[in-house]
Amino acid sequence: MENRSWLQKIREWEYWPFHWLYGPVYLIFVGYLARAGFRFFFSASNPTIKNGGFVMESKKAVYDILPKGTYPPTLYFEPGVAINQLIQEIESAALPYPLVLKPDIGGRGRAVVIIRHQEELNFYVPKYDMPFLVQPWVHYKEEVGIFYVKNPGEKEGKITGIVGKAFGSVTGDGTSTIQQLILADERLKLYIESLAEQLAERLQEVVPAGKKEMLVPFGNHARGTAFFNWSHLADERLNKWANDLAARIDGFYFGRLDIRYDDWEALLNDGAYSIIELNGAGSEPTHIYDPSQSVFYAWGEIIRHWQMLWKVSKANRNLGHKYMSFSTGLQMLKDNAAYEKALDHLHQVLLAPPPAKAKPIAVVS
């Protein structure tokens, strides 16, 4: 991000580093750990997801518990896979371009790239030094995150928050370059350094007047997408839709569904949507990042969702699902810290410019 004054950094809390935001309320979470005998209670929240979905869960394993047809076709590959084998599997599965490559264990949109043709596969695949997934690009244009909580043993759950997402884009005026358009945008200019790396030689392109160029096609706040609080949309119809879907997901009680769609009515009535991710115990109530809201609202929502996580986990424990031991939990956190470093490194490696004709980041809508 660009340099900002300390006053700006304090006022624009949605850009605070993770530990700045969560630091003032960490003791609340520690309190729940203490009530659980310093066992990692959240591991029981979603019994069919590794670690309850707190960290280190496989995306492919999570897709496998979702109803068929509700998520993109997905292929799993180990690092070092022969490119010919990968292409053969893609062709056998009839996955069309553009494709999405992303780590099987992800985090905040890092190391996710869009692939438009085989030359880009040849360029990017050898760089993945961790297990990764290949999926077709989901062409639904809108994305929403729906936070859902259900107490085990109860017939129905409820939606506890909804985040609407506005992908980072610019609209051309026929004279300004992509770089100039980014710098003229109050949000995108904060990401100029990372966007400059991702867009490489495209920065000096002039966008035709009226043409919309999507620069951040990923629904991640950390990569420049704007988040808005749409929790007011959680009406009776949407809660019924969420309950019907959750009833088809074995062992899912707490977390956020990130969903692509085109039309709200078609999502509710026709099943016209695709689940991009299901996040478990580690889910953030990302509707807190609406820039119109205060950090005090954010802290309140974080604490409220921790309270629900505690209740769900405790109820599952009463049903026979054990809490993770303290020693196992510490090892989980150590493993995750090491993985985060490796993921950060991979993300930087993937930012290296692709072949001249490749434009893997920008998507025109």
Image (cartoon, helix red, strand yellow):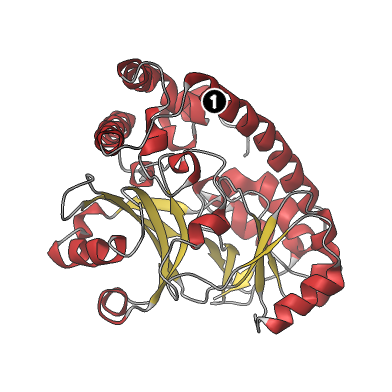
Q: Is residue 289 above or below residue 21?
A: below
Q: Quadrant of the N terminus?
A: top right
In the image, what residue occupies the spot 20% across and 55% down? 232
Give coordinates of residue 135: x percent, y percent.
Answer: 62, 70
Q: How many numbered marks have been drawn onto this rendered protein structure?
A: 1
Q: Quadrant of residue 203?
A: bottom right
In the image, what residue occupies the spot 35% across and 45% down? 290
In the image, what residue occupies the spot 50% across and 54% down? 225
Q: Is residue 34 above or below residue 64?
A: above
Residue linked to disc 1:
328
Q: Residue furthest left?
A: 236
Give coordinates of residue 197: x percent, y percent.
Answer: 75, 51
Q: Is residue 122 visible?
A: yes
Q: Nearer the viewer, residue 210 or 288?
A: 288
Q: Is residue 120 left or right of residue 198?
A: right
Q: Quadrant of residue 171?
A: bottom right
Q: Residue furthest front?
A: 320
Q: Is residue 357 visible?
A: no
Q: Is residue 258 left or right of residue 95?
A: left
Instruction: Indicate the secondary structure of the residue bearing disc 1.
Output: helix
Q: Is residue 254 left or right of residue 5?
A: left
In the image, what residue occupies the spot 35% across and 15% down? 34
Give coordinates of residue 123: x percent, y percent.
Answer: 85, 64
Give coordinates of residue 54: x percent, y percent.
Answer: 47, 38
Q: Is residue 29 above or below residue 76?
A: above
Q: Quadrant of the C terminus?
A: bottom right
Q: Nearer the viewer, residue 201 or 300?
A: 300
How packed mark 1 is, by other alpha carbons closer than 10 Å (few <14, some 14-19, many 20 or more), is: few
Q: Is residue 185 left or right of residue 239?
A: right
The amino acid on which the numbered mark 1 sits, given as a three-letter code, is Thr
